Image (cartoon, grey):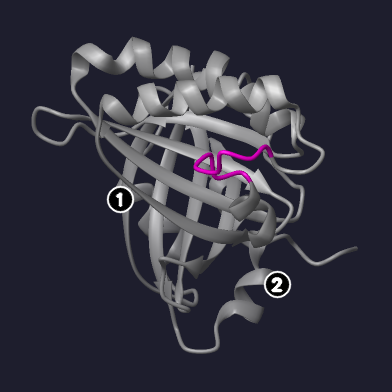
Amino acid sequence: MTAYEYTTFRIERGGWPALRDGVGDIDTASRELGGAVYLLCSGMIGLASDEGILIRTGSDDGPNGDGSAASIVTGSVFQDWGSERLSPTVRPLDATPPREPGVYAHRWFWLKPEHLDEFLQLSEHGIWPYFEADGCEIIGLWRGDDDGSLRRLLLITRYPSVAHWERTRLQSPVVPPGADAQLYRQAQDAGRSRAAITEKSIVRLTRIVLPPAA
């Protein structure tokens, strides 16, 4: 089973160009540890300009946690970091790394354990069909470390732009132009039900960092 390591990091001032140039080196170092770079993002909204997120994949029994992250970022433009293990739920279906440009929303949810299955069903069958029909891509929904008595879930969704992310908010009583009205109403109902079982949530918008074109 594929394991995922989620690392939030800070880089040195002006370090983003060097980090973009070094994506291949980070991936090579990850592969030497039995994994690979899954997703690298720079902060846009909700993260500071010197903060980003690195997700690595590896085998379930392979190296994971702060130790492997440290072996990758030591000596690079990274200043500090913190990592945790993620377990996939209904998505992703495989460990193929996303490589499409765009805005990647990282949204964390906290909920009680007894609501986990309902949350997954509402997301996969109630909300995501509208989002995907409207040009979004559900990257994955992972379970993170538990926070006391609450379960933590991470949803990552790709949007073509920040404007598109704003378009897919479900609060408007008017169906967005060009959207499927039935899927939109279904998503609204499921969204209200999901919100009712969510204790709290937070979203951060990021932009994918891709290696330089060959």
Q: Work out whether 91 lies above or below 202.
A: above
Query: Which residue is denoted by mark 1 in the rendering?
Result: 66
Q: Nearer the viewer, residue 32 or 208?
A: 208
- Please state the horizontal and vertical placement of residue 143, each as a whole percent of the image: 35, 28
> Residue at the spot x=36%, y=12% of the render?
118
Main secondary structure along the magenta-highlighted residues: loop
Say which residue appears at 53% left-offset and 41% top-offset: 156
Q: Disc 2 marks which amino acid?
A: Asp
The stretch in magenta equals: 168-175
Regarding residue 91, the answer to whether it shows in the image is no
Q: Which mark is residue 107?
A: none
Left or right, 124 with reference to 133: left
Q: Nearer the viewer, residue 174 or 16?
A: 174
Would you say 2 lies left or right of 158 here? left
Above or below for 142 versus 74: above
Badge 2 density bin: few <14, some 14–19, many ≥20, Cα 10 Å = some
Residue 85, picture quadrant:
top left
Disc nearer the start of the sequence (2/1): 2
Q: Is residue 94 visible?
A: yes
Q: Position of residue 142 (x, y in %)?
A: 43, 29
Q: Position of residue 114 (x, y in %)?
A: 20, 12
Label 2 SS:
helix
Residue underneath mark 2: 21
Total marks drawn?
2
Residue 206: x and y in percent read 55, 60
Secondary structure beneath label 1: helix
Decide: is 152 above or below 166.
above
Residue at 62%, 33% (x, y): give it: 138
Tag 1: Cα neighbours inside 10 Å, few (<14), some, or many (≥20)?
Answer: some
